[in-house]
C-alpha cells in the first residue's frame, strides 16, 4: 500500500486477509511475515520505580487486572431484563497511563508517573522485501497435506478476488510466488505430448498395414486403454500431473503392440484364403490367428507390467515422485493386456473386411524384406561371428558407461529460481533488512527477472524455525522469449552469483519446490551436504570447518559453508545464589525481573474490535543495550528495598551455540556445498577423498554425506535388491509361456543387450545416470523382453510348420529345413516385428523432442528406452535368429527335435507358399 505504514499493512494481513484466506478450501494455514506488529509498550523508568518503592511486577499486575470486562448477571427494570456488564477493557494509551499503581496520603501514583506508554512496533524475527524497493507485509498460504495444489491455488485466488473490495484504499495484494502456472504448463505439455504420440502411433499402424479399417482396431484400443488408466486414477484420487500423465505417455507405444501383432497375423491368415471364402471362413481364420499369438502376447504385456515393480519399492522423495508414474503405466498396460484378449478380437471381426493387400504388394513390407534378407543370410552363414560381434558391442559399452555421471534427479525448470545465501549467525534485524534489500535490488537489474521477493528470518508459523541470518529469495523469471539471446538458466545463475559476492555470504541456488522438498527430507538445502556428528559442539564445528576448506578445493565447488554452531552471541546474567539468599530473593523472582525488564513480557492484550495487540512492560532501549547499565540500573525488589542487579548476578558477554541440531541422539553440524558443471556422483567421490586426506576424526565423531547424494544412494541400494528379483519374476513368466529353458534364456538376453543402446544414447546426449534414467531402463527391460517374445513366436511357428510338413511326409526335419524355417519366420514375418518396435519408438519420440515444462525428467525416462529399443531391435533381428539356429541345430543332432514331438498340424501356422 502506497499510503499505508508497515504496521497498518501487517494489521490488514493479520486481521482481515489471513482469516479470509484460511477459509479457502484446502488451506491449512496462512502464516504472516514482514511488516510491523503493533504493540503497546510500557517503557518503565527504573529510577522512578525505585523512588516510589514500586516493584516492576506491580506494574504488570495492575495492567493485567485493569484490562477486563466482567458480568453481573441481570437486573429487572420496568418488566425488562437488563444484563449487567462491568466495562474495563483498556482502549488506548491514555487508559494505560491513568492506571493507579499505589496511593500515598491521598496522592495516587499513576503509570505515567513511572513510565512512558507508546504504541510501537513489536520486536520481530522475520522481514520481507519486494523488488529491492522496500519492505512489505506478507502472508504465506500453506495447503493441507494430500490436497490438490492446483485446486487449492484456485480457491485462494477466488477468495482474494472476494476480499479485494474490503481492502483499505491504496492497498493491493500482489502474488509473489504462484505454483499454478508451473503445474498448468507441465500438464499442458504432457497432454500435447500424449496427443502427438497417439497421432504418430496411429500413422505407424496405417502405414504398415496399408488398411485403414484394420488400423482402426489398434487405434481404437489406444483411447480405451488410456480411459481405463484415467478411471483407475480417479478411483485412487490421483490427480493429473507430470508423473501420472508421464506414465501413460511412456506406455502408449507398447499399448498397441498386441493389437498390431494380432491384426498382422490375421492379415496373413486372410491372405491364404481363396477369394471366394465366406465371411464365416474369414472370421474363423481371424479367430485362429488370435489364438496363435494371443497367449504369448498377453504374457509379453504382463511382463511389461511386472517389469515396473521396482519403481513401486522406491522410498522417500523418489518414491513419492515416481509412484504416480508407476501406477498409471501399470494401469495403462494392464488395460492394454485386458483389451488384447477381449476387445481386440471382437473389433477385428467388425472392422477387418474387404480386400486385404497381400504382404508381397505392401511397399513397406517389400522394403523391409529387401533390406533384411541379406542381413539374415549373413547371420545364418556366420552365426558364431554374429554372437561375437554382439558380445563385443556389449563390451564396448563399458567406455560410455564409465563416462556417464550420476545425479539424483535432473533439475526441473520451475520457471523461478530460489536464492538461499548462508551467512554467519547473530545478524541483527537491521543488517538483515539492509542486505536483503541490497541483494534484491541487484537481482532485479537482470532483464530476465520479472520480480524478486525475499524473506529473512521466520514467518509466524511453527513450520518455519529459520534464524534471522537465513535468507530465502524467490526470483520469478519472464518467459524465455523475453530473455537475452543465448541465455540459459545456468548462465543466468552464474551471472547472478558473480554479481552477489558479499563478504561473509555463501551463495546457493536452487528451485523453490525442490528447495522445500530437500529441506524437509534431509535439512540440506544444497545439492551436496555433509553432516558432522559428535558429542562436543566446539569439536564438531572445528571438523565442519576443516571439511569446508577441503571441499572448496574440489573442482566444481561454487560455495561451501559450515555452520558455526558455536558462533552465537549471548549476554548471560548468572545469579549468585548466596547473594539472592542474603536478600531473601528467590531465583524465580529474579528471573521474572530479567525477563520483564529486558525481554518485555506481554502482560495483557488490548482489544480493538477483532484486532488484538499485546501490552508489554520493559525498560528503555538505551538501558537494555548496555551491559553496564543493566548491572547498575535494573533493580530487583527485596525486603530491604530495591537491589541493583549487578549486586545479585554476573553480567557477561560470551559466545555460544545459536541453535542446536541433533540426529540419532548425537549433536550435529551441517556443511552446505553448492556445485556447478559437475554431476553429484563423481563430485562426492572426489570430495570424499579430499575430506579423507585432510580431516582426521577423533573417536566418537564422524561425518555422513547428505543432500541429493543421500537420496541417490538410497535409491541405488533399493534397486540393487529389487531389480534382480523382478528379472527373476520375468524369467518365470517367460518360462511359463515357452515351457522351455532355452527359449526363455534367449529372450532374457534381450535385457542386457537393450542396455547397450540405452547407455550409448545417454552418453551421446550428455545425460547423467539418475532415478529418472533408472526408471527408463526398468521400463526398457519389459519392452525388450516383449520384442524377443514376438520374434520367437514367429520363429517357433515357422519351425513347427516345417516339422508338421516333414511329419506328414514321414521323414525327419533337417538343418536345411531349420534354416528355411528361420528365413520364413524372421524375414517373411519382419513386418509385425518392426511394427511393434517402430510403434514403441515412435510413441517415445515426442517425449524425447519435447522442450516444455517437465521435459527434463520425461526425456531422461525416454532416452534409455529409445536407445535400448534400437540395440534390442538389432538383437531381435540378428542375434536371436543366430542363437535359435544354434540351439535347434544342436537339438537336431541329438534327436531332440524329432517329428513325433511336433504339435498337431492344425494347431500351427501353415507354411506360406
Image (cartoon, rainbow, N blue to C red):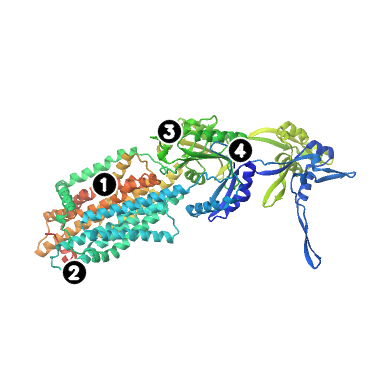
Query: What is the distance, in whole Å, between disc 1 and disc 4 at their CAs?
Result: 58 Å
Residue 78, by quadrant, is: bottom right
Q: Is residue 900 shown left or right of residue 34?
A: left
Residue at label 3? Answer: 556
Tell which circle, 1 or 4, labels the residue nearer the N-terminal end: 4
Tell which circle, 2 or 1, labels the residue nearer the N-terminal end: 2
Tell which circle, 4 or 2, labels the residue nearer the N-terminal end: 2
Quadrant containing the N terminus in the rendered view: top right
Pinpoint residue 660: horizontal percent, then vertical percent: 59, 41
Callout 3 touching callout 1 (CB < 8 Å): no
Residue at label 1? Answer: 870
Query: What is the distance, in whole Å, between disc 3 and disc 2 at their CAs?
Result: 71 Å
Callout 1 touching callout 4 (CB < 8 Å): no
Pinpoint residue 598: horizontal percent, then vertical percent: 72, 39
Callout 2 touching callout 1 (CB < 8 Å): no
Residue at label 2? Answer: 279
Tell me the SS state at disc 2. helix
Q: Report the front residue among 679 and 599.
A: 599
Pinpoint residue 482: horizontal percent, then vertical percent: 42, 38
Residue for point 42% across, 31% down: 555
Callout 4 touching callout 2 (CB < 8 Å): no
Pinpoint residue 158: horizontal percent, then vertical percent: 52, 53
Residue at label 4? Answer: 658
Query: What is the distance, in whole Å, between disc 4 and disc 2 at their CAs?
Result: 86 Å
Query: What is the distance, in whole Å, between disc 3 and disc 1 at their CAs?
Result: 35 Å
Judge depth for marks 3 and 2 and give the one in front.
Answer: 2
Tell which circle, 3 or 1, labels the residue nearer the N-terminal end: 3
Quadrant containing the C terminus in the rendered view: bottom left
Query: What is the distance, in whole Å, between disc 2 and disc 1 at their CAs?
Result: 40 Å
Judge depth for marks 1 and 4 and give the one in front.
Answer: 1
Q: Report the front residue among 588 and 866.
A: 866
Callout 4 touching callout 3 (CB < 8 Å): no
Amino acid at each position: 500500500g502506497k499510503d499505508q505504514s508497515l504496521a497498518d499493512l501487517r494489521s490488514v494481513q493479520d486481521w482481515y486477509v489471513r482469516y479470509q484466506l484460511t477459509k479457502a478450501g484446502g488451506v491449512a494455514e496462512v502464516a504472516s511475515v514482514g511488516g510491523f506488529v503493533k504493540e503497546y509498550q510500557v517503557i518503565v523508568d527504573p529510577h522512578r520505580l525505585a523512588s516510589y518503592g514500586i516493584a516492576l511486577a506491580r506494574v504488570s499486575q495492575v495492567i493485567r487486572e485493569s484490562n477486563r470486562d466482567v458480568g453481573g448477571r441481570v437486573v429487572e427494570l420496568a418488566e425488562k431484563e437488563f444484563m449487567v456488564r462491568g466495562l474495563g477493557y483498556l482502549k488506548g494509551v491514555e487508559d494505560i497511563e491513568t492506571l493507579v499503581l499505589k496511593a500515598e496520603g491521598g496522592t495516587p501514583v499513576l503509570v505515567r508517573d513511572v513510565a512512558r506508554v507508546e504504541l510501537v512496533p513489536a520486536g520481530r524475527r522475520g522481514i520481507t522485501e519486494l523488488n529491492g524497493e522496500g519492505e512489505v507485509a506478507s502472508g504465506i498460504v500453506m495447503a493441507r497435506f494430500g490436497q490438490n495444489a492446483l485446486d487449492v491455488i484456485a480457491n485462494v485466488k477466488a477468495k482474494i478476488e472476494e476480499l479485494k473490495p474490503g481492502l483499505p484504499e491504496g492497498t493491493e495484494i500482489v502474488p509473489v510466488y504462484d505454483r499454478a502456472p508451473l503445474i498448468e504448463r507441465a500438464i499442458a505439455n504432457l497432454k500435447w505430448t500424449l496427443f502427438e504420440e497417439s497421432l504418430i502411433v496411429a500413422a505407424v499402424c496405417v502405414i504398415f498395414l496399408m488398411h485403414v479399417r484394420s488400423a482402426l482396431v489398434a487405434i481404437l484400443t489406444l483411447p480405451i486403454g488410456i480411459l481405463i488408466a484415467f478411471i483407475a486414477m480417479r478411483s485412487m484420487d490421483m490427480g493429473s500431473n507430470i508423473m501420472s500423465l508421464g506414465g501413460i505417455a511412456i506406455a502408449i507405444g507398447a499399448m498397441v503392440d498386441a493389437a498390431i501383432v494380432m491384426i498382422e497375423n490375421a492379415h496373413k491368415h486372410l491372405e491364404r484364403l481363396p477369394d471366394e471364402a465366406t465371411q464365416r471362413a474369414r472370421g474363423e481364420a481371424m479367430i485362429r490367428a488370435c489364438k496363435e499369438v494371443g497367449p504369448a502376447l498377453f504374457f509379453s504385456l504382463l511382463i511389461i507390467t511386472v517389469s515396473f515393480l521396482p519403481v513401486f519399492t522406491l522410498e522417500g522423495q523418489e518414491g513419492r515422485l515416481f509412484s504416480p508414474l508407476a501406477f498409471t503405466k501399470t494401469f495403462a498396460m494392464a488395460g492394454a493386456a485386458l483389451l488384447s484378449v477381449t476387445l481386440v478380437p471382437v473389433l477385428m471381426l467388425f472392422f477387418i473386411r474387404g480386400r486385404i493387400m497381400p504382404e508381397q504388394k505392401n511397399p513397406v513390407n517389400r522394403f523391409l524384406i529387401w533390406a533384411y534378407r541379406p542381413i539374415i543370410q549373413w547371420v545364418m552363414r556366420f552365426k558364431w561371428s554374429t554372437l561375437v560381434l554382439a558380445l563385443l558391442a556389449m563390451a564396448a559399452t563399458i567406455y560410455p558407461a564409465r563416462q556417464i555421471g550420476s545425479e539424483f534427479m535432473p533439475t526441473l525448470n520451475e520457471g523461478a529460481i530460489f536464492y538461499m545465501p548462508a551467512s554467519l549467525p547473530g545478524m541483527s534485524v537491521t543488517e538483515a533488512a539492509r542486505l536483503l534489500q541490497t541483494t534484491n535490488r541487484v537481482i532485479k537489474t537482470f532483464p530476465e527477472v520479472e520480480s524478486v521477493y525475499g524473506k529473512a528470518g521466520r514467518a509466524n508459523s511453527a513450520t518455519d524455525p529459520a534464524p534471522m541470518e537465513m535468507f530465502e529469495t524467490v526470483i520469478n523469471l519472464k518467459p524465455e522469449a523475453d530473455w537475452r539471446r543465448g541465455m540459459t538458466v545456468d548462465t543466468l545463475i552464474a551471472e547472478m552469483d558473480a554479481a552477489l559476492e558479499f563478504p561473509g555470504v555463501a551463495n546457493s541456488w536452487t528451485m523453490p519446490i525442490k528447495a522445500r522438498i530437500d529441506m524437509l527430507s534431509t535439512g540440506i538445502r544444497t545439492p551436496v551436504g555433509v553432516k558432522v556428528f559428535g558429542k562436543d559442539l566446539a569439536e564438531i564445528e572445528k571438523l565442519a570447518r576443516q571439511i569446508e576448506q577441503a571441499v572448496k578445493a574440489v573442482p566444481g565447488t561454487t560455495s561451501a559453508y559450515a555452520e558455526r554452531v558455536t558462533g552465537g552471541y549471548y549476554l548471560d546474567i548468572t545469579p549468585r545464589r548466596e547473594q539472592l539468599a542474603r536478600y531473601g530473593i528467590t531465583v524465580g523472582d529474579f528471573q521474572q525481573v530479567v525477563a520483564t525488564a529486558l525481554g518485555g513480557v506481554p502482560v495483557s492484550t488490548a482489544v480493538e474490535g477483532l484486532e488484538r495487540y499485546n501490552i508489554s512492560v520493559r525498560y528503555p532501549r538505551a538501558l537494555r543495550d548496555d551491559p553496564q547499565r543493566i548491572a547498575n540500573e535494573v533493580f530487583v525488589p527485596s525486603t530491604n528495598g530495591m537491589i541493583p542487579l549487578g549486586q545479585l548476578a554476573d553480567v557477561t558477554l560470551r559466545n555460544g551455540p545459536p541453535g542446536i541440531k541433533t540426529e540419532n541422539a548425537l549433536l550435529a553440524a551441517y556443511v552446505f556445498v553448492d556445485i556447478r558443471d559437475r554431476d553429484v556422483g563423481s563430485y562426492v567421490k572426489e570430495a570424499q577423498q579430499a575430506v579423507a586426506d585432510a580431516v582426521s576424526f577423533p573417536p566418537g565423531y564422524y561425518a555422513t554425506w547428505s543432500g541429493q547424494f543421500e537420496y541417490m544412494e538410497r535409491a541405488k541400494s533399493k534397486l540393487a535388491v529389487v531389480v534382480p528379483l523382478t528379472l527373476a519374476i520375468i524369467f518365470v513368466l517367460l518360462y511359463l509361456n515357452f515351457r522351455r529353458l532355452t527359449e526363455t534364456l534367449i529372450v532374457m538376453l534381450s535385457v542386457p543387450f537393450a542396455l547397450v543402446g540405452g547407455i550409448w544414447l545417454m552418453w551421446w546426449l550428455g545425460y547423467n545416470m539418475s532415478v529418472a534414467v533408472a526408471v527408463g531402463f526398468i521400463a526398457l527391460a519389459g519392452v525388450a523382453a516383449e520384442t524377443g517374445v514376438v520374434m520367437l513366436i514367429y520363429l517357433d511357428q515357422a519351425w513347427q510348420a516345417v516339422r508338421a510338413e516333414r511329419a506328414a511326409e514321414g521323414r525327419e526335419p533337417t538343418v536345411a529345413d531349420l534354416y528355411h524355417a528361420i528365413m520364413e519366420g524372421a524375414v517373411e514375418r519382419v513386418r509385425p516385428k518392426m511394427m511393434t518396435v517402430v510403434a514403441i519408438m515412435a510413441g517415445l519420440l515426442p517425449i524425447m523432442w519435447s522442450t516444455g515444462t517437465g521435459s527434463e525428467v520425461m526425456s531422461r525416462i525416454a532416452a534409455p528406452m529409445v536407445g535400448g529399443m534400437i540395440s534390442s531391435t538389432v538383437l531381435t533381428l540378428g542375434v536371436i535368429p543366430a542363437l535359435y539356429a544354434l540351439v535347434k541345430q544342436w537339438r537336431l543332432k541329438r534327436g531332440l527335435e524329432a517329428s513325433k514331438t511336433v504339435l498337431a498340424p492344425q494347431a500351427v501356422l501353415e507354411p506360406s507358399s
